[in-house]
Image (spheres, coloured by chain):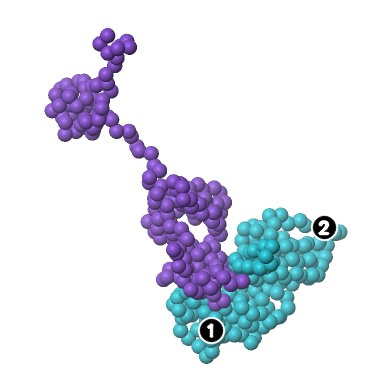
Chain colours: A cyan, B purple
Amino acid sequence: MATFPTGIPIKNIDVIPVFNTIISSFDGGNEQRRKKWAFAKYDVNIDFHPMTKADMQTLWSFYVARQGPYEEFSIYDIVTMDHVDLYVGVGDGATMTFDLPGKSTSSQVVYVSGVEQSGNYSKSYNTGSDSSDQIVFTSAPDTGTIITCDFTGYLRIKCRFTDDTLTRQNLYGNVFQYSIKLKGVEFA
Amino acid sequence: MRTFDANFQAQLEAEIAFFALLLEFDFSITYYYNNSDIPIYYSNHLYLPISLGMGSVNISSALSVDRTTIELANAGLQMSSILLGEDVRNKTVVLSFAAINSAREVIAAENIFTGLMDSWSVKEDKATLTVVNELVFWNKKALRMQSSSCPWMLVTDGSNECAYSGSESWCDKSYDRCNALSNTNSFGGFRFLPAISEREIWWGRKQGG
């Protein structure tokens, strides 16, 4: 999976966790809530500073290579934060190595079926897909078990471009302006 | 009266809950899907996440066929491949509702509808399936009405259902003619049903008058 290009000067970035909840509320005052998604998805809005032609070309080429919203990609948050209850994967009784949804992570806590794991896995940094960190279990988690984690680090967000169009704004000369919206997709 | 699993019941009564719809297609290959965003493992089967929606389940005390509709994502044309690749009509479809715990594992699941594939349509972006229960067979029209006369076409080489091999060139579809042709083993009518040729027709207001 491709990774969103770095180095283009960002003016403002919004990272928006999105949940999907059905809420039943009637006159009696009681309320019931049911969640539709097991994990949040993350939408991202980015406003760039006026950029050079070279930066514009990088962004332009990345958008065209993804064919707009067609192909998903990874983007890393630009600040390290504490993250909890993130989806890592589903055990199949054979897979021992899993990508964490982040990089430069620390304080990792790994759960299998909600049970905190200790001493049965090792950590590997920047070795996973799109330079994400990894965990390697000493024995494969059972089939059907859900693996989750907490960590401090840069969150890896799976997303796609929201729109089928991308407007290039030529401010003057070789100075360009972009604002893009990214739509989070499921981790699984 | 239907009794739910106690854990399932507790989830139904809770203020907050996480449920997923489990869908099983018993086609030539059995497909397992769920409508959440993660794979769900239940009863030794992996239910893959897919974008799907379920219409209302129509169950009536009147003489109507219980049915529901299911819509599945088809942008990847996976459902087109499945549905067009084999005759899925009358294959079993099982819909269950699963309560999921905070570790995202199934606490308990309850069947909400089991039926047979009735009709389906596929579009570029989604597939719509209609699932009915077994009572649909009582609602089917018969392929042909029974009659006293034979429906088969006379042949002389035994090549169709008539199976007559001989030199005679006509048949009036009656049992008597079939008997004359010594072909009653292949007679396709029901000889004891009233025949139109035996219907008594009156001329005038009084019989024989």
Q: Is residue A66 left or right of residue B36?
A: right
User: Residue flagged by tag 1: what amino acid is it?
Assistant: Val
Residue most extreme to the bottom: A119
Q: Are the residues flagged by discs 1 and 2 in contact, CB closer than 8 Å?
A: no
Q: Residue at x 23, y 32 (%)?
A: B190
Residue most extreme to the top: B209
User: Residue flagged by tag 2: what amino acid is it?
Assistant: Asn
Q: Is residue A147 left or right of residue B172?
A: right
Position of residue A122 measured from the top left corner of the image (x, y, whole percent) = 54, 87
Distance from label 1 to label 2 (Cα)? 53 Å
Position of residue A87 measured from the top left corner of the image (x, y, whole percent) = 58, 75
Picture quarter with the C terminus of chain A: bottom right
Measured along the vertical axis of the image, is residue A73 above or below residue A97?
A: above
- Give the mark nearest the N terminus, 1 or 2: 1
Label 2, secondary structure: give it: strand
Displayed quadrant of residue A153:
bottom right
Using a 10 Å C-alpha cutoff, classify the residue at mark 1 as few (fewer than 14 neighbours), some (14 to 19) or many (20 or more). Answer: few
Measured along the vertical axis of the image, is residue A114 above or below residue A169?
A: below
Label 1, secondary structure: give it: strand
Position of residue B92 measured from the top left corner of the image (x, y, whole percent) = 40, 55
Measured along the vertical axis of the image, is residue B156 above or below residue A131?
A: above
Q: Is residue A29 left or right of residue B140?
A: right
Any mark on residue B77, and which? none
Q: Residue at x 61, y 78 (%)?
A: A85
Q: Mark 2 highlights which residue?
A: A170
